[in-house]
Image: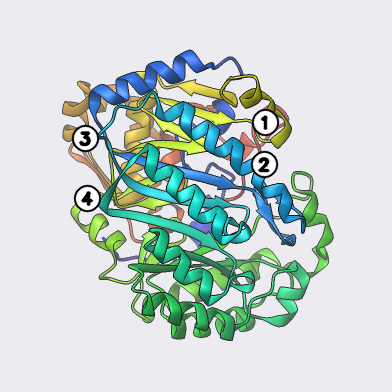
Amino acid sequence: MTDISWDESLIKRHDLAGPRYTSYPTAPQFSNDFGPEALQAAIERSNQAARPLSLYMHIPFCDTICYYCGCNKIVTANKKRAQPYLDKLHLEMSRIAQWVEAGRKVKQLHWGGGTPTYISHDQMRALMSHSQSLFEFSEDGEYSIELHPGTTNQETISLLKDIGFNRLSMGVQDFDPQVQTAVNRFNSVEEVQALVDQARQDDFDSISMDLIYGLPFQSCHTLKETLDKVIQLSPDRLSLFNYAHLPHLFKSQRQMDASALPPAEEKLAMLHLAIDTLTRSGYQYIGMDHFAKPDDELCKAQFNGSLQRNFQGYATYGGCDMFAFGVSSISAIDNIFVQNHKDIPNYNKALEQGQLPISKGLQLSQDDLLRQHVINRLICQFELDFHSIGREFNIDFSHYFQKELAALEALLNDGLLSRLDHHGLQVSPAGRLIIRRVCMVFDAYLPTTQEPTLIASSTQPRYSKII
């Protein structure tokens, strides 16, 4: 399961633009005519199924801007802007919680942004306390928060543990001074080490770190130095993201010197270097840019087949309904996706008028649910058992996916698959690095052209490349 191999020619042939599949169907399929009635009906079905809960809070504020960032954020030094937003966040949670049957356990909680640690300690305590007053938290749940090491201190780490968090995700990105200056993101090794030491002293269950490759002035040499420092810090999990330069979509990226971006060949070499360095250092490749130590819960979940993927990445708890709160957040409840307004004025206006801040959503068809399951299995396990999927969804897999299986023959012949027969398929060690390419075969919303590179057209959503 953990074996991967590097085949540069294979990667180049299949390094197409395509979705990251944090959801299926993906966000471009959401419709503006989705309303609160559909959400309430989904919550009622969710109550009947009595699935565990996953909660997400979006806190969009940041002290300073990181030029590479494509997140939904508000950059301001005016801390007074946070409380009115948090008041609305509390109100949204209360309105949704009244529809959720008592006794359903929260298994996952995640605060993202923005920079969640932007808010004060008192505001953090109040938000967590309000969440716990509305929902019943499981004692063995995973409760995580994202933080910027350059703007977080040891006192905050202890506060986070005290109010109930047991996992931290640190956005390190890069330690090279020239790269940090180019992207306006600063955190020293010493700062990160102090936070790691405090987190371990406070007995956090897991520490995760995010890195980005493809930033201005990065090279294999600078990335190797960053990786060596990160490995010394010994996080339990690592995410290595490919920087996608899309200045037409994200204005902050225009502040970077595009001529300093590494060329495609160097980016590919950096990825190869990172994978080789991390796996040689004992980390296992989970998939989709994620690595973990062998004793981490992610590795255990992948081994036993329970690994899942959602809007926050890989998750160890499956079968949760995700209730997401705050601007731009996306909930996944029963067979629906629903997204909030992306800007605070519309978000506030809806709540002030006694409404929910719904912008758009989607009710998944049976075909959507089937393909969602298939894509999730591919991303998490790199294999499919046609017979078990057929039993679960009451279909003849080979007949239902006749066109897709014909397309997979070409991927088998090209080396992305190591097995394809009437029982199922297995992704090859080389194919695991470009698993999105295999998933695209099962995506009913991509144009049915002979050239998948055409999916980024004037009438289609624009995706980043796989690698």
The x, y position of residue 220, in whole percent, is 61, 79
- Depicted 314 relative to depicted 39: above or below: below
Residue tagged 1: 348
Q: Mark 4 Cα within 10 Å, few/some/many (few <14, many 20+)?
A: few
Residue 50 falls in which quadrant of the image? top left
Residue 305: which disc? 4
Please state which amino acid type lies under the numbered disc 1.
Asn
How far is mark 2 from mark 1, CA to CA? 9 Å
Q: 276 or 170: nearer the eye?
A: 170
Give the residue at x 75% y 44%. Answer: 249
Residue 386: which disc? 3
Q: Could you tell whether 52 is left or right of 165 in the image?
A: left
Is disc 4 placed on a helix, strand or loop?
loop
Is disc 2 placed on a helix, strand or loop?
helix
Q: Earlier in the sequence, mark 3 or mark 1?
A: 1
Q: Could you tell whether 305 is left or right of 239 in the image?
A: left
Residue 111: which disc? none
Q: Earlier in the sequence, mark 2 or mark 1?
A: 2
Is disc 3 placed on a helix, strand or loop?
helix
Residue 147 falls in which quadrant of the image? bottom right
Foreground mark, 3 or 1, reads: 1
Give the residue at x 22% y 50%. Answer: 305
How far is mark 3 from mark 2, CA to CA? 51 Å
- Depicted 299 relative to depicted 370: above or below: below
Residue tagged 2: 84
Give the residue at x 75% y 68%. Answer: 184
Is disc 1 placed on a helix, strand or loop?
helix
Q: Could you tell whether 219 is left or right of 162 in the image?
A: right
Q: Earlier in the sequence, mark 3 or mark 2?
A: 2
Foreground mark, 2 or 1, reads: 2
